Image: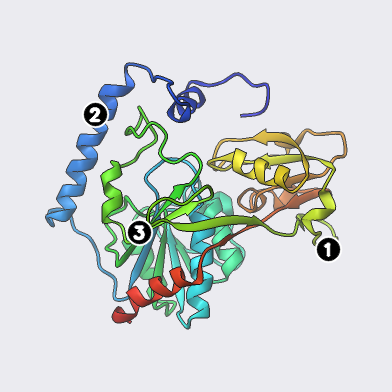
Amino acid sequence: MRPGAPVSGVDDLQRRWYEPGAGVPWWAHPISALYGCVAGLRRGLYRRGWLRSTRLPVPVIVIGNLTVGGTGKTPLAIALVEALHARGFKPGVVSRGYGGAVHSPQLLDANPDPVQVGDESTLIRLRTGVPVAVGADRPVAAQLLMEQGVDAVVADDGLQHYALARDVEICVVDGVRRFGNERLLPAGPLREPLARLREVDFIVGNGGEPRGHEIPMQLVLRDAVPLAGASMPKPLAAFTGKRVHAVAGIGNPMRFFDALRASGIEVIEHPFPDHHRFTQDDFGFDDGLPIVMTGKDAVKCRAFAATHWWCVPVSAELPAWFFDAVAARIAPRM
């Protein structure tokens, strides 16, 4: 949603999830109860084996969350893939390819099209260089990774996708917004009840103060990379004290805007819906100011970017012992 645009019903409902004391529409409560029953029934069918989970010949690490919207799953997936590679593994990534047009299983090439295979999977492929497969049927998509010789599979945003058996579950929590009003969809942001946290192997807290046994994670802005032209990357400090148009079509755009402000940059906010399919018309800024955006958004804008457009990638920083612990969990299945 652009600044000054009217608030939609969906935007207003999501605001209420995280606003202390705010109520939600009456109709959301019975739908939430029905949602909880269906989700619980589905989970129970998998537990009892009445719905089949496919176990791969290599270990599977699932990264996901309990809430809708962005919590930092994709940056964590990239960091985990890099850490596993540094520890001698040959990881691959399987994803739904959300936002892409392709539904049948597909292995991404070296220059994937985010319109076809989704923005997050494209970003992971370009950042890590490891094999990435997408598809609505994740077990079948993951089989494509086996043909590439991977010895560990990272499932991005796969916590609720029980058709793929897993060896390690990692739940990412927004350390600032937490779980909002702690209600199930659509009365709240939860995909599953909070009790689900007791079943996962690791809980990662993105930002804020970690609680209990949460592993702390910080998203760190890196050098700005030009989307077009022959310019070299710039330190983010080169934008300190300057006004920029900041574009973010992610689950929580304010996290990106706040991080830029923390670096001393004067931000003109341009939030868009998560997975927004950008076109040239979305960038009608004729004042010549720099345009900066997230890596997830940049992969969709490369074809029509101008020389004053910049990508500001983020890296997830976590304790080394966390990656060691994950590697130790999957080692017995190697």
- Return the residue nearer the eye: 210 or 287: 210
Helix, strand or loop at disc 3?
helix
Task: Report the mark closest to the observer, 3 or 1.
Answer: 1
The residue indicated by pointer 1 is 232
When asked about the image quadrant of residue 169, the answer is: bottom left
The residue indicated by pointer 2 is 33
- Please indicate whether residue 102 sits to the left or right of residue 260 in the image: left
The residue indicated by pointer 3 is 138
Q: Is residue 250 above or below residue 205?
A: above
Q: Is residue 245 above or below residue 171?
A: above
Image position, residue 237 (x, y; %): 81, 54
Asked if the residues shown at circle 1 and circle 2 are in contact, with their CB atoms under 8 angstroms apart, the answer is no
Image position, residue 267 (x, y; %): 75, 38
Name the amino acid type tagged 2: Ala
Name the amino acid type tagged 3: Arg
Q: Residue furthest right?
A: 288
Q: Quadrant of the N terminus?
A: top right
**x 47%, y 83%: residue:** 88
Task: Report the mark closest to the observer, 1 or 2.
Answer: 2
Q: Is residue 215 above or below residue 268?
A: below
Q: How many marks?
A: 3
Q: Quadrant of the C terminus?
A: bottom left
Of label 3 and label 2, which has the lower sequence position? Answer: 2
Of label 3 and label 1, which has the lower sequence position? Answer: 3
Helix, strand or loop at disc 2?
helix
Query: How crowded is the residue under tag 1: few (<14 C-alpha within 10 Å), some, or many (20+)?
Result: few
- Return the residue nearer the eye: 53 or 248: 248
Colour treatment of the image: rainbow
Image position, residue 8 (x, y; %): 53, 21
